[in-house]
Image (cartoon, rainbow, N blue to C red):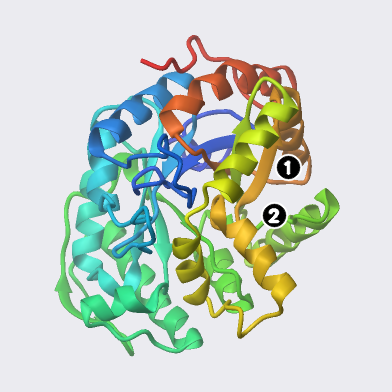
Amino acid sequence: MPDTLPSSLRDRMSLHGGNRLKLGLFGANCSSGRAVTKVPERWSGTWPDNLRLARMADDAGIDFMLPIGRWKGYGGETGYQNATLETITWATALLASTRRITCFGTVHAPLFHPIIAAKEMVTADHVGEGRFGLNIVVGWNEDEFEMFGVRQRDHEARYDYAQEWIDAIKRTWSERAAFDVDGTYIKLKGVQADPKPFGGSQPIIMNAGASPTGQAFAVRNCDAFFMQASRVSVAETAARVAQVKARAKEHGRGIGVYTVGVITCRPTVKEAEDYHHYCVIEQADWSAVDKLLAMRNVTRETVSHDEFMKQRAQFAHGNSGLPIVGDPDHVAGKLIELSEAGLTGIAVSLVNYADELPYLCDEVLPRLERAGLRDKVARHATSG
């Protein structure tokens, strides 16, 4: 991070810490989290459990919490992700109850008026004294948009709209004088908004667009980009990271590159593998998995049998996040490899976040500290 950056912006870009490898928790605002499983210990997603988890993560030095923007679940036997907490209000409440951790709001740009969204996010940012971040979503599940009476635009137009939206947000956060917006999609008159974001800088912005258009949008506008890590090799992941950073450099910008992972960590490799198999094969909520895949046009009719079964297995545990399954040495080793591939951080999900986080913090974080990737913290998470 260049020393010429204002301290407030430097703090935001580093997620208010000096960890070389950032670690976050992904999806805790949804029932079942990201594990499409019927196991009774699956994550509740309730507010009391989210609050308890955030405080544990804050004490342990976890860098961020990233929610899923979900308005309608996938059903199945478990009602997978049917119960969700709205993300900006969720983040605001967690920021009021923590000291160090960054909390993101995941916002569907087509569903939130930019002036209202900008004001909501500034409020959260003041509550957290600069620890709020924006995860911008350009388009998603068709049935969610239908529920709002909003039509999804074609792929390219989605990003044209998102560009106007984020431009309006940033102007609302920065301009002192009243201004107008006369875009193709967004037209605003005499916009004024105070206060501005906390500390004279703007919230960190992330995006996870996978297409070339989506990646181009991210490198133009965002501070952090989420990409899918390779399941084939670390070298392939490193190549993807290098490509994103090179494109950002073409725009004269730096960008953090993150990925999503699903961790199952137990004292032995066998225990971890056995539990992973139990959750995602023996106790998978296959009806919910099949609906989730069908919404991505992956069915027995549209792809080969082998491809369908492969996708099914991947989506049962973490919606295609990179699986990291093993003992603490193995898990820490994989995280070190991801850092060496150039990744800035990883957002992880667990079957039960609050039950599993203490072991992760007690056993894996010290290994990352010894590898020079994490700062030591005075106290790790406890089950209380």
Instruction: Using the rendered image of the protein, determine whether residue 160 is visible from the camera's viewpoint.
Output: yes
Q: 157 above or below 114?
A: below
Q: Residues within 10 Å of mark 1 (few under 14, many from 20)?
A: many
**Which residue position is annotated with label 2?**
229
Amino acid carrying label 2: it is Ala
Q: Residues within 10 Å of mark 2 (few under 14, many from 20)?
A: many
Q: 167 above or below 225?
A: below
Residue at coordinates 34% horizontally, 46% vertically from top-left?
Answer: 29
Check disc 1 and report its element: helix, strand or loop. Answer: helix
Residue at coordinates 18% horizontally, 49% vertically from top-left?
Answer: 195
Q: Quadrant of the C terminus?
A: top left
Q: Position of residue 360 (x, y in %)?
A: 57, 24
4 sits left or right of 152 in the view: right
Q: Position of residue 266 (x, y in %)?
A: 64, 25
269 sits left or right of 317 in the view: right
Distance between mark 1 and mark 2 Cα atoms: 8 Å
Check disc 2 and report its element: helix, strand or loop. Answer: loop
Amino acid carrying label 1: it is Leu
Q: Quadrant of residue 177?
A: bottom left
Q: Position of residue 146 (x, y in %)?
A: 28, 81
Q: How many marks?
A: 2
130 sits left or right of 272 in the view: left
Q: As drawn, which residue projects farthest toward the top?
A: 378
Pick the residue in front: 318 or 108: 318
Mark 1 or mark 2: name the one nearer the start of the chain: 2
Residue at coordinates 20% horizontally, 46% vertically from top-left?
Answer: 123
Instruction: Using the rendered image of the protein, determine whether residue 372 is visible from the camera's viewpoint.
Output: no
Instruction: Kindly check if marks 1 and 2 are in contact, taking CB atoms under 8 A apart as contact.
Output: yes
**Which residue position is annotated with label 1?**
338
